Image (cartoon, rainbow, N blue to C red):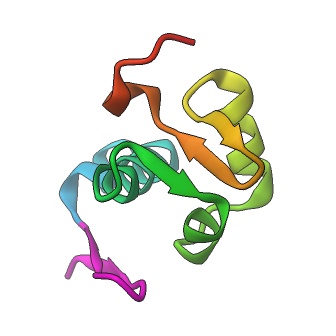
Amino acid sequence: MPERLENAAAPLDVTEPVHTGGMAGRTNVIMLTLASRSSGVVTRTELLEHGLSSATIAARAQQGFLMVVWPGLYEVPELTGEKT
């Protein structure tokens, strides 16, 4: 049965693509799904509410998968076309 992650706006349906990529794949799906709902940006609170740790968020920012727009607000370059 697929795992479901809930938030106040709408549920995230974390299914097959997540499990084929392990935890990194699950993290990517969560980041991309949340950001795709809001013009390519996601808040730290949303990421934490969906199970990402502070260390994971920091690592993704350091690796360029998340770009800090403002403290607590991140852009996902893969969705916005921005280059790191």
Q: Is residue 21 left or right of residue 10?
A: right
Q: Where is residue 44 in the image (x, y as percent from the top left)?
A: 66, 60
Q: Which residue is outermost to the top?
A: 83
In this view, the residue in front, 45 or 53, is 45
Identify the residue at image location x=29%, y=46%.
20
Identify the residue at image location x=57%, y=63%.
47
Q: In this view, does 1 lie above or below 35?
A: below
Q: Where is residue 60 in the image (x, y as percent from the top left)?
A: 64, 36
Q: Quarter-wise, where is residue 33 in the image?
A: bottom left
Q: Does the magenta stretch include residue 58?
A: no
Q: Is residue 68 above or below residue 54?
A: above
Q: Is residue 15 above or below residue 78?
A: below
In this view, the residue in front, 56 or 72, is 72
Q: How many labels does the image show?
A: 0
Q: Give the range drawn in magenta.
A: 1-14
Q: In this view, does 30 lie to the left or right of 62?
A: left
